[in-house]
Image (cartoon, rainbow, N blue to C red):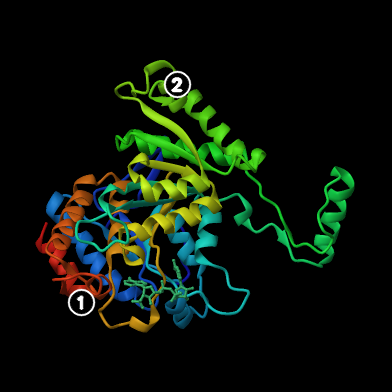
Amino acid sequence: MPTFDSLTPPTDGAAIEIRDNALHVPATPIIPYIEGDGTGPDIWKATVRVLDAAVAKAYGTKRRIVWFEVFAGEKAFHRFTTWLPEDTLRAFSHYVVGIKGPLTTPVGGGIRSLNVALRQLLDLYACVRPVRHFVNVPSPVRRPEDVDLVIFRENSEDIYVGYEFASGTPEAKRLIEFVNAEFKWSVRPDSGVGLKPMSPFGSKRLVRKAIQYAIDRKRKSVTLVHKGNIMKYTEGAFKDWGYALAREEFGDVTISWDEVERKHDGVVPPGKIVIQDYIADVTFQHVLTRPKSFDVIATGNLNGDYLSDAVAAQVGGIGMAPGGNLSDFHAVFEATHGTAPKYANQDKVNPGSLILSGVMMLEHLGWSEAAETVVRGLEAAFRKKIVTYDLARLMSGAREVRTSEFATAVIEEF
Ligand code: NAP
């Protein structure tokens, strides 16, 4: 147990532990949470009611989450005059699994982002975004029900990590002079420059996690999305390392699409998970025109960033997209939208993103019955067109409810 400067952990409940390379979840796990800024407290209050009710429905008094409030963002600043207290990082690290609402990104430099700090401290190398449609939720596409996929985005490498120098700086000039002289490249001397590192280690552990997820959830395929036709030694290598990993570590349960065509007349042998790859630009077309081709997607940091939001837009957009940042065991689940400050404390916005992030958290704990209970409640509420303002304005015949009323409706449908 770490020593906290200003927090007092709950006296009931127990910490989740990592032992013998496995997650050990007690019946009363202590879960740290950050309610978030702006509309965060509204959607958190709704979410915690739904999650607690689902756990009670699924397990009676046998299991219960013991919530532990920790602080970041505005609330932390008001209490402790820091946007990110060390206590918060200690709590997420010690208790292994946590959840957070949206946080204000303060304007002005020098402030450590919680997401970056947690990602580095806990090595949360996979950003996981499941995307599925709920009946009646408005969508810009004709068959949103065909979208049911999970994106695994590599979180620690790629051009996204920010190894870059601004145009005209001595560092940029030095790097350009070096590569132009050493490698006979012809980078314009006044360019801004960045590095795009992608390693076998980083790529393989991400693909490993995606394949393991596909096995655990009985998914049919894992698609490696890349831009390897142009960036052969980074994006292309990601694809090659992905296929190699599938062969080396999951050869008994996976089969490449190439092999399905060559040896099985295009028919996937029963029980095998197909490993295929798509170029990123084609993927953006196909997730729109034939989303059923995709099941689990494993991709690099930048591709994953774009793709996650593009696919989420097909199923109801920003209020509905959940996410989680995961290492092998540590995990922090979060609403993927921002704080929507103009609606703060109005009990108005859609808590769907945070509730669905809670579903991911329950699944991560292995509490699948509770996760399924929440999904059942959400499905039924949407079927009855009980929705918050953001969806109501796009639907005919909707019953518009407040954030808290939406939570009540979901619970009543368990
Ligand atoms: P935002 O908070 O995501 O809000 C933009 C718009 O999206 C809202 O005005 C609203 O649209 C809609 N929206 C967002 N959340 C919703 C919800 N739960 N239900 C229904 N509609 C929702 O983006 P922003 O205004 O650009 O950012 C505000 C603050 O959040 C900034 O400080 C930003 O840095 C921060 N932020 C934090 C995170 C995070 O912590 N993960 C992520 C992104 C942004 P309508 O007005 O059309 O209804």
Q: Residue furthest left?
A: 412
Residue for badge 2: 259
Left or right: where 190 falls relative to 351: right
Label 2 CA crowd tier, 10 Å (few <14, some 14–19, many 20+) = some
Asked if residue 112 lies left or right of residue 211, the reply is right
Q: Check residue 358 in the rendering and tell me which mark sits there, or answer none.
A: none
Secondary element at image label 1:
loop
Query: Which one is closest to the eye, mark 1 or mark 2?
Result: 2
**Type of amino acid at the residue the image marks with label 2:** Glu
Please say whether residue 372 is visible from this viewpoint: yes
Q: Residue at x 33, y 81 (%)?
A: 343
Residue appearing at x 54%, y 61% in the figure: 117
Which of the pair 292/76 is nearer the observer?
A: 292
Give the residue number, with chain letter if any, for mark 1.
402
Instruction: Give the image location of residue 155, x and y in percent.
Output: 53, 51
Q: In the displayed image of the protein, which residue is found farthest to the right?
A: 181
Q: Nearer the viewer, residue 141 or 205?
A: 141
Amino acid type, residue under disc 1 in the picture? Arg
Where the N terminus falls, by quadrant? bottom left
Image: 234 above or below 86: above
Q: Residue at x 37, y 17 (%)?
A: 264
Q: CA distance from mark 1 to mark 2?
A: 52 Å
- Determine the secondary structure under disc 2: helix
Q: Quadrant of ligand 1?
A: bottom left
Res 116 → quadrant: bottom right
In the image, what residue occupies the spot 86% across and 58% down?
A: 174
Residue 66 x, y percent position in the rendering? 27, 60
Front residue (pair 15, 228): 228
